[in-house]
Image (spheres, rainbow, N blue to C red):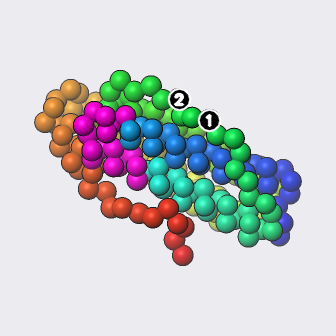
Amino acid sequence: MKLSDTLESAFNAQITLEFQASLVYRQLAIELELRDLPGMSAWLRHQADEEIVHANKFIDHVADRDNHPAIGAISAPDVAVDSVLDAFQAALAHEQKVSESIRNLYRTAEAEGDLDSRPLLNWFLEEQIEEEATVSEIIGRVVMIDDDGPGLLRLDEELGMRPVATTEAKA
């Protein structure tokens, strides 16, 4: 079933937001790499890649529905980072923005009576709960560590052990 023009536009806005999220995470990765925290930087780079996977899921959904996926204009990420805590708070703020956007997309699909989008949107609603919880946990640990160098280095090492994923949607 083809998406309505309203839903196609809403999905395309979400595609754009997912690519923007990837750029935000990539910029945060750069900021922490410059602070000699390669593990945290790697974790953030993996998040950037995961956001591309998310964009691809939305692109596939729109294309599979015989609509035209399109990436809108994306401005450079505006993230000010003075500390590790700032970096992860910026990540959480962007995740919250993405979560709200997905909830609004779900509401739009419901208003349009589009049942076929439910499985994808339900998956994303669950994913966003996990994303926010993970970043919130990291923030809690960074707050607990404060400016303790050995503690930051341990967390850096731990976050750097995250398995590498691909930017292609899983079959």
Residue 164 percent coordinates (x, y): 36, 61
Question: Residue 78 shows which numbered tag?
Answer: 2
The amino acid beneath tag 2 is: Asp
Q: Main secondary structure of the magenta part?
A: helix
Front one among 68 and 57: 68
Question: Residue 75 shows which numbered tag?
Answer: 1
Which image quadrant: the C terminus?
Answer: bottom right
Q: Residue at x 84, y 50 (%)?
A: 6
Q: Residue at x 31, y 34 (%)?
A: 34
Q: Secondary structure at mark 1?
A: loop
Which image quadrant: the N terminus?
Answer: bottom right
Q: Magenta includes 42?
A: yes
The answer to whether residue 76 shows anywhere in this view is: yes
Q: Secondary structure at mark 2?
A: loop
> Quarter-wise, where is residue 115 in the image?
bottom right
Pointer 2 with pointer 1, Cβ within 8 A: yes
Q: Residue at x 26, y 56 (%)?
A: 161
Residue occupying the far right of the picture = 5
> Quarter-wise, where is residue 116 in the image?
bottom right
Structural distance between the alpha carbons of marks 2 and 1: 8 Å
The amino acid beneath tag 1 is: Ser
Q: Residues within 10 Å of mark 2 (few under 14, many from 20)?
A: few
Residue occupying the far left of the picture = 150
Residue 111 percent coordinates (x, y): 81, 51
| Magenta span | 31-46
Question: Residue 135 shows which numbered tag?
Answer: none
Residue 5 percent coordinates (x, y): 86, 53
Front one among 26 and 159: 26
Q: Decide if residue 103 is on the left or right side of residue 2.
A: left
Q: Residue at x 52, y 66 (%)?
A: 168
